[in-house]
Image: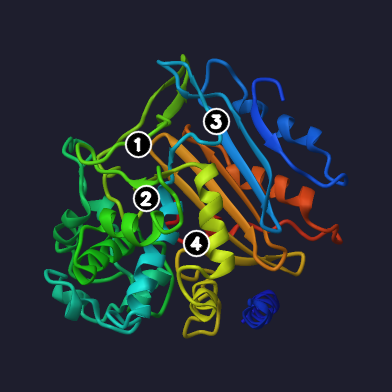
Amino acid sequence: MTDHSLATAALLASFALLLGCAGATSSTRAPLSVDLRAVDPLFAAYDSPEGPGASVVVIHQGQVVLSRAWGLADLDARTRATPETQYRLASLTKQFTAMATLLLVEEGRLRYDDRVVDVLPGFPAYLREVRVRHLLQHTSGIWDYEAFVPDTQTVQVKDRDVLGLLSRADRTYFPPGTAVRYSNSGYAVLALLVEHVGGMPFARFLHERIFTPLGMRSTVAHEEGISTVARRAYGYVADANGFRPRDQSPTSAVLGDGGIYSSVAELVAWDAALDAHTLVPEATQRLAWTPATLPDGTSSRYGFGWFLDEDAGRVRLSHHGETCGFTNAIVKYPEQRLTVIVLTNRAGGEPWRLAQRLADLWLPPSAPVATRAWPFETLPNAR
């Protein structure tokens, strides 16, 4: 293990013990030491009356200290983005899929070391050594279902179709548990596990067990023709002629890996529940925020639905979300009780860097450190 890996592992272990305004719509509450005049220039690329936008929230010590939006949620209707605008979360969904799994584990209906093939009907037999824990931590080695979806396909893939797509392979990328490779397939399978063991559709499980208890009234795992998205943002991509719609793809209907729509306003309740251990006990949340240790002693830098690393000696949780027409990020410093969420309805950009610039406004000053890649920039297949 490298010196940096050792330092990160030690820091995360310590955390485990400690865990117990042009064109912008805005609301702010900040200490005098934070200069909010720095915020709008960061989002100048999104601050256009003609282009797709961004919504942002900063939560510090349990209080919303910044809530702001720029640009348009719907270009055709010229609907402005607000903090209440609902964006497709893309891979930020994975923390909710993980939480749904943890709820079933807490109830004794599922175990981390259960073999998936023993629990989920139709799971390919060649994946018999894949455990629930491997799916959560991206250490399963399962092939990407997207690899089996042709570019010409027009019918959208659903979570239930993923098992059939995985049956087209006959091996894993590596023996389960021995390495880490980001896997959308793994989280689609987790959604199927939650549906089968929980005894109800995955979208309904999220609604009844997570969204409704937390007061997230508009947040939804969206299924076309079944549910609706209030105050919906539509996705766009830039080309030589400006922005054009790019809201859906053949894989956009898979729920477990990226199908939730929510707003920065409602994600405040989600963040509060994580800090207060409203849904699962502290020890379980601590486990979700602990990276897997690989057989060679290195850290995977991924827990259950969260990337983990350290920034200037502080534990940092994060996740990016990139899908057809949307790019998002969440950055969370649990010890400092600081969370920044940036949601955008355009392809491209690096909102995680914008989130970090915002987080730095509230973090205590630290000595300069060498710039390092974010965990998802180096993890194989993360996108």
Q: Is residue 319 left or right of residue 121?
A: right
- Please state if 4 lies on the left or on the right of 352 as rendered: right
Numbered disc 1: secondary structure:
loop
**20 shown above or below 213:** below
> How far apart are the alpha carbons under marks 2 and 4?
18 Å
Q: Is residue 140 left or right of residue 238?
A: left
x, y percent for residue 31: 83, 47
The x, y position of residue 297, in whole percent, is: 54, 84
- Say which of marks 1 and 4 sits in front: 1
Q: Residue at x 34, y 48 (%)?
A: 259
Instruction: Point out the tag, 2 or 3, that comes first from the N-terminus.
Output: 3
Q: Amino acid at mark 4?
A: Leu
Whichever of callouts 4 and 3 sits on the residue coming sooner in the sequence is 3
Please name the residue that numbered disc 4 is placed on: 379
The answer to whether 165 is drawn above or below residue 78 in the figure is below
Q: Which residue is mark 3?
A: 82
- Image position of 103 with respect to 365: above or below: below
Q: Quadrant of the N terminus?
A: bottom right
Residue carrying label 1: 229
Q: Position of residue 57 (x, y in %)?
A: 62, 44
Kind of residue at disc 2: Gly
